[in-house]
Amino acid sequence: MEIRIIKCLQDNYSYVIVDEVSKNACVIDPSEAKPIIDFIEKNKINLRFILNTHHHYDHVGGNQELKKRYNSKIVGFKGDKDRIPEIDILVSDNQIWKEESFEAKVYHIPGHTSGHIAFHFFNEKKIFTGDTLFSLGCGRIFEGTYKQMFDSLSKIKALPRETEIYCGHEYTLQNSNFCKLNDPENLKLKKKIIEIKEKLENGLPTIPTILNDELECNIFLRADDIKSFSKLRDLKDNF
Ligand code: ZN
Ligand code: FE
């Protein structure tokens, strides 16, 4: 199973998961169809499934065109069946979604939106977190409460520390400035920022990040009560 990172729109990432044997693939959050189509055609793979973490346009924008072109099935949260364009397969919290060689556990992680989910490919130790957990940051709370977002992040925190995190946007550098300001003595953070800058200077994504790094460096994961988490979230909204 190989993950390819596809840059979309301004700063979005879509991810194509390819089964090297069958050449079947899933795409996570196709922001737009064009870059995904280019990748599929170039590599001669079959796009079997489209997985959406939430209904925002920069995560579902490619759904319709890709489905029409490849006859792919669209997988999304059952509570968002009226908001995810062209949805076919409805999944719910803690369900294991399994098709062909693809197998992921679904976590309902509300906060950014009420129907946000993550797909945890537990065999591969990779999780797709959409706009809930970013590298060195977390999503804005649009439809939920601070408590919901805090609890959603806690679910991710409980996964094995070596889990690779694939998020919806390249926000890492801006996020790192906020972490640095509020956690100036954190040496692990300083080290991670050097690595981040190196990647970006070489035109590389900073994603995936490792859960262990996030636990040590991401100030939103380091906040261990809702009150301090909420305060940080407010500060970041005005940062
Ligand atoms: Zn979003
Ligand atoms: Fe987004």
Image: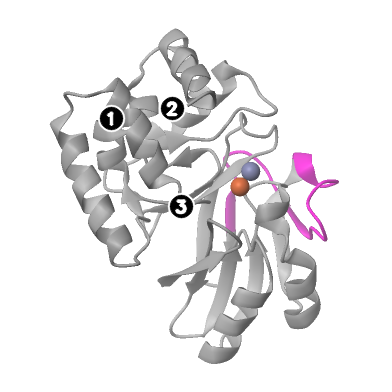
Disc nearer the start of the sequence (3/2): 2
Instruction: State the residue at coordinates (56%, 75%).
Output: 25
Considering the whole magenta stretch, tell me its main secondary structure: loop
Identify residue type, mark 1: Lys
Q: Which residue is mark 2?
A: 154
Identify residue type, mark 3: Glu
| Depth check, front residue: 91 or 162 | 162
Depth check, mark 3 against mark 2: the one in front is 3
Query: For the residues marked 3 and 2, what is the alpha-carbon distance in whole angstroms?
Result: 22 Å
Where residue 151 appears, as percent x and y from the top left, is 50, 23
Q: Which structural element holds mark 2?
A: helix
Can residue 203 be seen here? The reply is yes
Q: Which residue is mark 3?
A: 170
Left-right relation of 58 to 186? right
Disc nearer the start of the sequence (3/1): 3
| Depth check, front residue: 209 or 157 | 209
> How many dots with numbers?
3
- The boundaries of the magenta stretch are 79-97
Instruction: State the residue at coordinates (34%, 65%).
Output: 204
